[in-house]
Amino acid sequence: MFSGSIPALVTPFRNGMFDEGAYRTLVEWQIAEGSKALVPCGTTGESATMPMEEHFRVVRVCVEVAAGRVPVIAGAGSNDTRVAIANIQAAKAAGADAALMVPPYYNRPNQEGIFRHFEAVAAACDLPIVLYNVPGRTVTDIKPETVARLAAALPSVVAIKDASGDIPRVSQHRGSCGADFAQLSGNDDMALAFNATGGVGCISVTANVAPRLCADFQAATAAGDYATALAIHDRLFPLHAALFSDASPGPVKYALNRLKPEIPAELRLPMTPPSDDSRASVDAALAFAGLV
């Protein structure tokens, strides 16, 4: 259902408010450069600092600009099952094609609790669900056996964004969930190995800044042209690292503003601008990639 380069979009802010004009520019550019789907209001989109009304306004704008040209996968997770249900229903009402949903964070449920959380969400809304496993942020890991259980029991669970960093899980998920279950890398720097073992795309931070290169990279892996894919990976690898040289999304917003000054680099607290060293790393990586 989902494949290729899928940017986890930043949310532009200006004077503390959502900059709709800049966001429309970003979405149009991403589609023109070959992105195959869009993720508004994920981690990179600073969803943790957005009230619900603003959050789904951003989703609606993304859906409106995309206009059916590419799918929109709206960030909709919560550690409160009732809020997660309200979020996925709001995502559907906003016109999203799917919802990206983390397991409950902070609460740290066991695997049965994770299953029952998603079971309740799926029962309340038929919007397709992309599981988002990012234990480094949530301190909650959706184990492979739970992914298999969810995929088997819940038809709306159609894909996973896996940011566990555990490449062998791609093979485990293929074996237990089948080849039609879409596996998307959550780590740009691991996308080459991820796709080589059965992944079909990446929900990407770097694609905010280098959408054409990320799209070409994904197209090369899909075609089995790993020589081309490796060359692009080598070109982008310093940028993958630089965009996490300080708290995200500070570096990626800085990089995007360098390339497109009309898209502001403003962040919301508790996020702060990247350090001098981080900005220098981003500058060098942009140059190495040939983007400036």
Image (cartoon, helix red, strand yellow):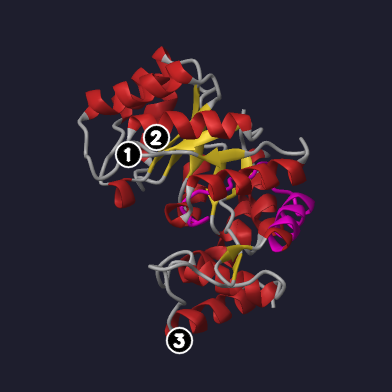
Residue 276 is tagged as 3
Q: Are marks 3 and 1 in contact (CB under 8 Å)?
A: no
- Where does the image place residue 64, in percent across and percent down from the top left? 74, 42
The one nearer the camera, 17 or 263, is 17
- Where does the image place residue 227, in percent across and percent down from the top left? 63, 52
Q: Are marks 2 and 1 in contact (CB under 8 Å)?
A: yes
The one nearer the camera, 250 or 190, is 250
Against 203, residue 189 (above or below) is below
Q: Is residue 43 highlighted in magenta?
A: yes
Element on which disc 3 rests: helix
**Crowd band around label 2 with a 10 angstrom C-alpha radius: few (<14), some (14–19), many (20+):** some
Q: Which residue is mark 1?
A: 79
Q: Is residue 114 visible?
A: yes
The one nearer the camera, 290 or 135, is 135
- Where does the image place residue 20, in percent across and percent down from the top left? 69, 58
Callout in the foreground (3, 1): 1
Q: Quadrant of the C terminus?
A: bottom right
Q: Amino acid at mark 3?
A: Asp
Q: Which residues are magenta?
A: 22-46
Q: Is residue 221 visible?
A: no
**Residue at 64% across / 73% down in the picture?**
257
Against 292, residue 167 (above or below) is above
Element on which disc 2 rests: helix
Q: Which residue is mark 2?
A: 83
State the CA–CA distance, disc 3 to disc 2: 38 Å
Q: Quadrant of the N terminus?
A: top right
State the CA–CA distance, disc 3 to disc 1: 35 Å
Q: Amino acid at mark 2?
A: Val
- Where does the image place residue 105, in percent across and percent down from the top left? 29, 43
**Residue at 58% across / 72% down in the picture?**
15
